[in-house]
Image (cartoon, rainbow, N blue to C red):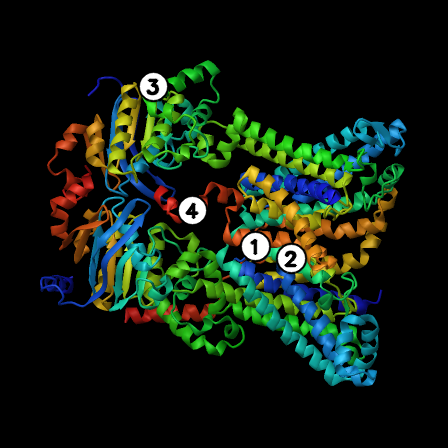
């Protein structure tokens, strides 16, 4: 396999998973909201790309397709495959429209993800702990089933889904540029998440998680804090969904309800990454995404068949293809269990938030000591 | 009344009741929602299918689908009764093994290390992954394929529905063995749990250990053993659910068995049953599971007839999700709480009075 | 006071919870067959003292003796086997089980005849429990619950009852009833150590009175003598020196 | 302490001479059949330390919970700084300067000591997560000031050496100090303390109360203190209320209240 493609694929994977895990970390790690329905917010990104951006692309290409814009928009659902095949031939010649589509998708996903997070924060205010986890899991499943069979949203066949506009086609190298796009998003999210962590806000999230009554006693509006965390974390998940959907390496050329709602890939894996990295630790989320992407997932997704072949599993009567697929599950499961037993606080345990640097704090302490002496 | 809808719904509801019961028992004793629970049924189903196939192979039995006349009507028993007995027994044994491994190898050691509810929930997920992977490998194993093919079953989309015992009565009413089995099973299960919990010393100890572990321990009761017993019952019922999934694939919302199905689809419904049953009530969970099973299929059916839109049937699972949401938000004590009037007592400040 | 050897003895005990010391240099004798009442203001350490007898605290120095045997570092469940019964202030019964189930559970390791005999003894001491036999324990009144808690203890025929604030949170009338039942228990021959928040009512049923203030024993003698002290209230609050 | 004595004399002026900062009017609270508060009237005067005593179950903690807004009363009013706050949620009261501490300290265990105190800063613009993660300039100046204040408070309560330790690792006494530090950071002018001395080494109790007195005298912070170790703390108090069975049975100078036969009797029970 082409090294360049492999690299792009791994970087895309790391970027998407980091954004997704960072979002979960704001909700579950920092604020203590056990969101087992994270996939639902991720799916928002896919839906935005599959629906809104596809419709924009169709409308923009309408004149060249000799149909009215309105007709083209309607065809996104009614005649998806054929229409989008044509649109994707035209779109690469429209760099302006392409860029608008990308920007629009990012903004729309952030807004819609945040909106859904805001809605989901209502049960999060009423319920605590494991009940809330089950509730969000159920909500995610319910939405999944609804979206899967609701044709105006996901097309006629849930397994096929909607074809995605080739928004990076204008660059001439969609693989490379979508990877760069994901990388930039991931870096921006990292900077934002790290700043958030080291701000009074991050401190407040963690305080509410540690002791709600106590936070209330020092005058904090718990409901608002939890709502903010749900909005931010869910918006980030939707952003990851956009990154995923635009990536030809990871999503392919379509978004399908069956895969964007997958609770194993988009809820449980981020949980595993978060625990591996260290609950509440943003650096940990980044590190575990890099480790899993670079060391395990990339090579394993790519070489799993070779590994299966090298182990000669077929001589034991085991199907190499299935063994290879199972490997991923086994590794993630084993990793979670080992971390829970050996390093329950994760690779980079939660660190203090430095709103000002440690040195500055020390300098201030010295100053106070001097003033007192004087 | 649509008889076929009723029987297949009953089988599905029984499966849910069995799973909800298992989830509730584990929550009551180990204080964790066991995400891996429905997967235990799949392990049991694979074990049962394999051993049933081996038995058929060893005895050289061939499926015999010609109906016989009996006092019930025309009766079809494709294999000997031992064949089915083996299936039931093996599924129970493997359900228990899979459950005990989860408890002793993962959850109990983690609890000893002071893991919180989140870590335990994640650990059950990890165990679920391990089981999925194992089943992935198992169901495509060459020998397994061969053995299962011998009785005409695919190993990746496994269904033995065509080998179920069936009766067609004189009036032309079709009754499947799974339907009869599930009805008897639920009645027997309810009865034996009642006797166990309320009429035996062990049952009293179990209730005591769940309610007040420190006091039970002070009185010299082996609380650990009581917990182990609830894991055994949980595994046992998961195994039986697996057997039903195997024999009645296609009934209600049950899909043919693979590494992921029907556990992946049924998990929310099973939790819904447990939650509307009140999470801390054994009988509540059985009733809750049954209820979810029936409403999940009957409500969309009525809606479909009423609106004339058969598409609505696809959304049936949304109902269990709504049931979870409504129960948790408005009646967190579940059915059991409503029946006991706990909510009303809480309204009148019972809790504060106690403290 | 009785010339018999005390059932339990504390010698210069310093104790507390982990790092926090709450008892200072406590020496105390628990007479056999009597009711010893420990009183003192909140936070003075009276419950800590009782828990120290049962091994539920950390003992930094000093000795705890039971029937002459050093049990300073013996864990609670082994003390239970020696014949000590500790009745917690709260959650001391199984609320979802019936009265008879509670009692059967307490004697789960006894032979059937023995168990029946002992349950009969409990019912004779507390006839109310017989009336409530098949009622769920949680539906009984606070006083009846404490009665059942003592009944659960009686099934195991302990040599020593340690009872922690059985009247806390109960209406005065019911509290009186509970204390009367503690007295009944003693009349059956049981030795009792009682921590009681109601000083007067507690000392009235006790033989020996122990007053703990700020982690130290400030009075140790016959209960009626303590009760008769004019400055009792001030002594109790740590206002009199 | 000379200053303190002077203030004591001040108390002998007729009632109403000093500003009443907090007042409860006929508070009633019932739990089931039990009346936990029966027409309770108390007044806290600015800059004074008021003691609240009473045997177990007399309703002290219920009163504190009602005043701080954790429980809604069944009747009566709570008036703070002239405003009826009976129905105000707890955090709104905190914003007005009314802060409570817990009997069992409740820090944020995974946050450092400094983070615990800084979290109490009121109105920090950095607590808007949408801006905080993007533009540090929006809050850094506020934070620097807060930091200076927090550190001098920590210095004052004697926890400065522990500033970067996790609060969960502190001892019981240190946690009490941390609670006070948080309350001061909060800008509280009225602090309600449920058993501040409980679980604190007796040698440190004097120290703790010296700090409370200093706050009251120098910063005019008002205190309501529930305490059982009356013998230990009575000498620091300006005024006292005694409760029994949900009612105020005595009030006045601490010595008078403590020598009131009704009060003494209430502790001994019937």
Q: Which residue is mark 3?
A: C124
The image's mark for residue B325 is: 1
Q: Which residue is mark 2?
A: A142
Question: What element does badge 3 sit on?
Answer: helix
Percent position of residue D72, x then y: 33, 57
Q: Chain of mark 1?
A: B
Give the class, few, some or many, for how many residues have Cα within 10 Å of label 2's Cα (few <14, many ≥20): many
Q: What distance separates the C-alpha of mark 3 from that of mark 4?
A: 37 Å
Q: Is residue C58 left or right of residue B209?
A: left
Question: What element does badge 1 sit on?
Answer: helix
Give the class, few, some or many, for how many residues have Cα within 10 Å of label 1's Cα (few <14, many ≥20): many
The image's mark for residue C74 is: none
Q: What distance separates the C-alpha of mark 4 from that of mark 1?
A: 21 Å
When the figure is inspected, residue B276 is found, relative to residue A147, above or below; the finding is above
Task: State whether discs 1 and 3 lie on one chain.
Answer: no
Question: What element does badge 4 sit on?
Answer: helix
Q: Nearer the viewer, residue A147 or C147?
A: A147
Q: Which residue is mark 4?
A: B344
Task: State whether discs 4 and 2 lie on one chain.
Answer: no
Q: Answer yes or no: do the residues labelled 1 and 2 have beta carbons within 8 Å?
A: yes
Q: Residue at x 14, y 50 (%)?
A: D257
| Viewer can see residue D238 | yes
Q: Chain of mark 4?
A: B
Q: Answer yes or no: do the residues labelled 4 and 2 have beta carbons within 8 Å?
A: no
When the figure is inspected, residue C226 is found, relative to residue D164, above or below; the finding is above
Q: What distance separates the C-alpha of mark 3 from that of mark 2?
A: 60 Å
Sequence order check, earlier mark of 4 and 1? 1
């Amino acid at each position: 396999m082409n090294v360049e493609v492999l690299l792009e694929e791994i970087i895309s994977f790391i970027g998407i998973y980091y954004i997704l895990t960072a979002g979960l970390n704001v909700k579950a790690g920092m604020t203590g909201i056990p969101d087992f329905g994270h996939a639902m917010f991720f799916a928002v990104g896919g839906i935005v790309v599959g629906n809104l951006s596809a419709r924009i692309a169709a409308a923009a290409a309408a004149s060249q397709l000799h149909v009215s814009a309105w007709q083209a928009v309607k065809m996104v659902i009614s005649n998806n495959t054929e229409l989008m095949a044509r649109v994707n031939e035209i779109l690469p010649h429209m760099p302006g429209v392409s860029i608008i589509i990308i920007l629009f998708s990012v903004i729309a996903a952030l807004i819609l993800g945040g909106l859904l997070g805001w809605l989901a924060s209502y049960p999060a205010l009423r319920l605590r702990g494991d009940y809330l986890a089950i509730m969000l899991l159920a909500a995610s499943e319910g939405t999944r089933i609804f979206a899967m069979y609701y044709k105006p949203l996901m097309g006629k066949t849930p397994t096929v889904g909607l074809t995605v506009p080739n928004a990076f086609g204008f660059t001439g190298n969609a693989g490379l540029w979508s990877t760069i796009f994901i990388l930039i998003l991931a870096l921006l999210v990292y900077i934002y998440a790290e700043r958030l962590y080291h701000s009074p806000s991050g401190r407040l999230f963690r305080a509410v998680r540690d002791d709600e009554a106590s936070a209330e006693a020092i005058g904090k509006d718990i409901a608002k804090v939890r709502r903010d965390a749900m909005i931010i974390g869910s918006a980030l998940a939707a952003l990851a969904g956009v990154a995923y959907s635009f990536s030809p390496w990871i999503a392919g050329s379509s978004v399908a309800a069956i895969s964007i709602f997958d609770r194993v890939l988009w809820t449980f894996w981020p949980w595993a990454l978060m625990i591996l990295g260290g609950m509440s630790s943003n650096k940990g989320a980044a590190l575990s995404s890099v480790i899993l992407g670079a060391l395990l997932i990339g090579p394993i997704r790519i070489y799993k068949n070779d590994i299966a072949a090298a182990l000669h599993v077929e001589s034991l009567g085991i199907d190499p293809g299935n063994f290879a697929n199972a490997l991923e599950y086994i590794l993630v499961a084993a990793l979670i269990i080992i971390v829970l037993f050996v390093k329950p606080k994760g690779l980079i345990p939660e660190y203090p938030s430095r709103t000002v640097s440690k040195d500055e704090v020390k300098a201030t302490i010295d100053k106070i000591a001097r003033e007192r002496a004087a | 009344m649509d008889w076929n809808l009723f029987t297949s719904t009953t089988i599905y509801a029984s499966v849910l009741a069995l799973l909800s019961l298992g989830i509730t028992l584990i929550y009551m004793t180990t204080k964790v929602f066991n995400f891996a629970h429905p997967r235990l049924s799949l392990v049991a189903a694979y074990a049962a299918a394999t051993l049933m196939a081996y038995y058929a192979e060893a005895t050289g039995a061939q499926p015999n689908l010609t109906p016989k006349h009996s006092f019930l009507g025309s009766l079809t028993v494709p294999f000997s009764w031992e064949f089915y007995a083996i299936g039931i027994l093996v599924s129970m044994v493997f359900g228990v093994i899979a459950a005990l491994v989860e408890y002793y190898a993962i959850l109990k050691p983690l609890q000893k290390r002071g893991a919180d509810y989140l870590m335990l929930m994640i650990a059950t997920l990890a165990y679920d992954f391990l089981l999925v992977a194992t089943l992935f490998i198992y169901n495509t194993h060459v020998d397994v394929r061969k053995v299962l093919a011998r009785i005409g079953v695919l190993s990746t989309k496994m269904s033995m529905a065509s080998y179920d015992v069936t009766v067609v009565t004189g009036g032309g009413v079709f009754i499947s063995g799974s339907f009869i089995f599930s009805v008897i099973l639920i009645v027997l299960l309810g009865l034996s749990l009642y006797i166990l919990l309320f009429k035996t010393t062990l049952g009293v100890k179990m209730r005591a250990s769940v309610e007040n572990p420190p006091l039970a321990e002070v009185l010299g009761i082996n609380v650990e053993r009581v917990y182990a017993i609830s894991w055994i019952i949980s595994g046992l019922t998961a195994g039986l659910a697996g057997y039903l999934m195997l024999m009645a694939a296609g009934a209600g919302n049950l899909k043919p068995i693979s590494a992921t199905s029907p556990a992946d689809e049924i998990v929310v419904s099973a939790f819904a049953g447990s939650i509307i049953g009140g999470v801390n009530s054994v009988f509540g969970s059985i009733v809750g599971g049954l209820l979810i099973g029936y409403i999940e299929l009957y409500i969309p059916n009525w809606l479909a007839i009423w609106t004339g839109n058969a598409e609505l049937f696809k959304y049936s699972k949304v109902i269990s999700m709504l049931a979870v949401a409504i129960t948790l938000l408005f009646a967190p004590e579940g059915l059991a709480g409503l029946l006991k009037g706990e909510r009303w007592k809480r309204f009148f400040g019972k809790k504060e009075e106690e403290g | 006071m009785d010339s018999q050897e005390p059932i339990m003895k504390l010698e210069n005990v310093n104790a507390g919870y982990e790092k926090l010391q709450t008892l200072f240099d406590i020496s105390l004798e628990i007479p056999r067959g009597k009711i010893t009442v420990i009183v003192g203001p909140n936070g003075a350490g009276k419950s800590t003292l009782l828990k120290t007898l049962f091994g539920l605290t950390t003992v930094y120095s000093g000795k705890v003796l039971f029937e002459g045997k050093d049990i300073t570092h013996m864990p609670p469940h082994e003390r239970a086997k020696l014949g000590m019964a500790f009745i917690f202030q709260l959650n001391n019964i199984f609320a979802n089980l019936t009265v008879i189930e509670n009692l059967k559970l307490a004697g789960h390791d006894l032979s059937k005849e023995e168990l029946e005999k002992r349950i009969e003894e409990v019912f004779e001491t507390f006839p109310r429990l017989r009336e409530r036999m098949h009622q769920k324990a949680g539906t009984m009144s606070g006083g009846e619950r404490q009665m059942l808690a003592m009944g659960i203890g009686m099934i195991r025929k302990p040599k020593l009852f340690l009872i922690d604030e059985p009247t806390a949170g109960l209406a005065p009338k019911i509290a009186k009833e509970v204390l009367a039942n503690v007295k009944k228990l003693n009349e059956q021959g049981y030795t009792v150590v009682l921590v009681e928040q109601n000083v007067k009512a507690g000392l009235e049923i006790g033989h020996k009175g122990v007053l703990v203030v700020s982690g130290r024993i400030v009075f140790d003698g016959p209960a009626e003598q303590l009760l008769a002290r004019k400055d009792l209230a001030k002594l109790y609050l740590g206002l009199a020196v | 302490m000379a200053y303190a004595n002077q203030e004591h004399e001040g108390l002998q002026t007729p009632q109403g001479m000093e500003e009443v900062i907090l007042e409860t009017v006929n508070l009633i609270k019932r739990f089931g059949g039990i009346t936990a508060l029966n027409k309770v009237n108390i007044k806290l005067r600015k800059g004074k330390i008021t003691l609240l005593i009473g045997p177990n179950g007399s309703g002290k903690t219920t009163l504190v919970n009602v005043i701080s807004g954790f429980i809604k009363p069944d009747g009566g009013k709570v008036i703070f700084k002239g405003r009826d706050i009976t129905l105000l949620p707890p955090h709104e009261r905190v914003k007005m300067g009314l802060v409570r501490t817990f009997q069992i300290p409740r820090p944020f265990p995974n946050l450092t000591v400094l983070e615990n105190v800084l979290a109490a800063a009121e109105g920090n613009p950095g607590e808007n997560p949408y801006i905080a993660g993007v533009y540090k300039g929006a809050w850094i100046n506020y934070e620097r000031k807060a930091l200076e204040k927090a550190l001098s408070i920590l210095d004052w309560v004697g926890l400065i050496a522990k500033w970067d330790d996790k609060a969960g690792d502190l001892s019981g006494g240190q946690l009490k100090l941390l609670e006070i530090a948080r309350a001061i950071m909060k800008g509280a002018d009225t602090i309600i303390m449920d058993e501040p001395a409980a679980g604190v080494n007796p040698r440190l109790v004097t120290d703790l109360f010296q700090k409370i007195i200093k706050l009251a005298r120098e910063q005019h912070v008002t205190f309501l203190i529930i305490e059982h170790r009356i013998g230990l703390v009575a000498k620091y108090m300006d005024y006292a209320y005694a409760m029994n069975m949900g009612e105020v049975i005595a009030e006045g100078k601490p010595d008078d209240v403590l020598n009131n036969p009704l009060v003494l009797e209430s502790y001994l029970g019937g």
